[in-house]
Image (cartoon, helix red, strand yellow):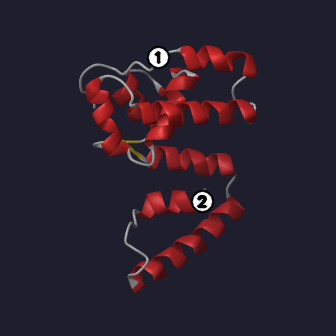
């Protein structure tokens, strides 16, 4: 995870075939090792969540919760949180789902996978898992950012 934090902070997306990109990746790794030695993983995750892109011109978990669901991040339900986690790899492309008003089948599958992982790791009680899976994902109407 520290590499993702550094990558997010540095915003280095150049291909590794570029020698300067390879040097940058080594630099990122060195910084990540230093960060991991001096910061708890929970803090590094907090940093990452607040610099990650969650949609077009949407940076950070607070604005993401408002953009996608029209609410404060602290009030997100487990399925909404899992959906946001599923958006991280491709936030701008995922925004088309918000415009349609419903997640794609592929997004729903990623959300289910994340929810099962949450249950496996104890972040979501197994008794609640199937109730949460049955809930629909409802996006906020219109543009909120």
Q: Does the image show residue 62?
A: no
- Secondary element type, mark 2: helix
Q: Quadrant of residue 104?
A: top left
Q: Are marks 2 and 1 in contact (CB under 8 Å)?
A: no
Instruction: Identify the mark nearer the N-term, 2 or 1.
Output: 2
* Residue with the mark numbered 1: 136
Looking at the picture, how far across and down is residue 73, in whole percent? 49, 27
Question: Who's the residue at 71% across and 64% down the image?
Answer: 37
Looking at the picture, how far across and down is residue 25, in whole percent? 50, 74
Looking at the picture, how far across and down is residue 6, in whole percent? 51, 62
Q: Is 82 above or below relative to 59?
A: above
- The residues tagged by marks 2 and 1 sit, at their Cα atoms, a distance apart of 33 Å
Q: Is 15 above or below relative to 117?
A: below
Left or right: residue 118 versus residue 26 is right
Question: Who's the residue at 24% across and 22% down the image?
Answer: 142
* Residue with the mark numbered 2: 2
- Which quadrant of the figure contains the N terminus? bottom right
Question: Which class describes the residues within 10 Å of circle 1: few (<14), some (14-19), or many (20+)?
Answer: few
Residue lying at the far front of the rendered structure: 105
């Amino acid at each position: 995870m520290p590499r993702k934090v550094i990558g997010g902070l540095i915003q280095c997306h150049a291909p590794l075939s570029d020698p300067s990109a390879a040097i940058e990746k080594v630099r990122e790794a060195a910084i990540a090792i230093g960060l991991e030695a001096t910061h708890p993983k929970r803090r590094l995750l907090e940093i990452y969540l607040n610099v990650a892109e969650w949609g077009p011109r949407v940076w950070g978990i607070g604005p993401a919760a408002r953009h996608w669901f029209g609410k404060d991040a602290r009030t997100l339900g487990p399925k909404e949180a899992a959906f946001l986690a599923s958006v991280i790899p491709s936030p701008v492309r995922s925004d088309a789902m918000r415009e349609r008003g419903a997640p794609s089948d592929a997004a729903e599958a990623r959300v289910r996978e994340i929810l099962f992982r949450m249950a496996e790791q104890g972040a979501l009680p197994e008794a609640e898992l199937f109730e949460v899976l049955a809930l629909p994902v409802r996006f906020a109407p219109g543009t909120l950012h």
